[in-house]
Amino acid sequence: MHPLDNVIWYALTTRQTEFAERRDQACRFVQDVSPLAAFLEPTNRGYESLESLVATGEIVGLFLNDPYQERPGWNVAGGAPLLQMLCENGVASTPATGVKIVELGRQDAAEMQDLAALTKPGPFAQRTRELGTYLGIRVQGKLIAMAGERMKIPGHIEVSAVCTHPDHVGKGYARTLMTEVMRRIRERDETPFLHVRQDNAGAIGLYEKLGFQERKFGHYIVIQKL
């Protein structure tokens, strides 16, 4: 199996162990970093291991290759068909004019969470920004777009949290930020990848223009421990 086929597991057991909690055949990001979790394999033993990591009432998100099968002790709280895309040969992109890209840090944490809560690019917790470099664009001092790095496995880094405030869409901000995030990833001789809902045609179209190609289809499922 290629590490990208079980990317959460390999991120937490290779390059991002400092953010990991693990029990036997399951692991998860610490709660305030990300709700994502994974198994070595989605077997009974895997789910039993996960159960020991999760408190009653808590939710976790899984990337599965096959549709989720209901299991006792867990309730489905959400999810969506997922597409993983890989960019092995990027396409040059013209940045938006008159735009200054800023590197985001601790002082921007509240604004980053507010923007993610408004635009819903995917799970974005209090400490998600610690997983990698996040870049943003400000207009009149307000953070209106961002993108950054989330999961990391050997040779690959995920582009994530790509979002733009609804009042500023259509101005090329997402493309500009993604191009810079991807450039920095390639400077380290690594390959960008990302995940997107299969029904998000607009985002998929942008990613294809930047050189991303479909790699695999899967399922994102959010489950709550009863």
Image: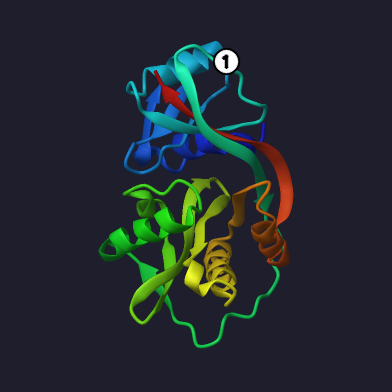
The residue wearing badge 1 is 43
Residue 139, x across and y down, in percent: 40, 79
Q: Which quarter of the figure has residue 135? A: bottom left
Observer-nearest of 158 and 143: 143
* Quadrant (top left, top right, bottom left, bottom right) of the C terminus: top left
Which residue is at a point 50% across and 67% down the rendered structure image? 166
Residue 156 lies, in percent from the top left, at: 58, 50
Where 107 falls versus 30 (above or below)? below
Crowd class of label 1 (few under 14; some 14 to 19; many from 20; radius 10 Å): few
Q: Quadrant of residue 116?
A: bottom left
Residue 224, x across and y down, in percent: 43, 25
Colour scheme of the rendered structure: rainbow
Task: Give me the residue at 30% from left, 59% from top.
Answer: 109
- The image position of residue 129, as x and y in percent, is 37, 55
Say whether residue 24 is visible. no
Quadrant of the rendering where the N terminus is positioned: top right
Residue 52 in the image: above or below residue 179: above
The residue type indicated by label 1 comes to: Thr
Residue 124 against residue 42 in the figure, above or below: below
State the residue in front, 148 or 185: 148
SS type, badge 1: loop
Q: Residue furthest left?
A: 107
Query: For the point 51% across and 17% down, which residue is it?
Result: 46
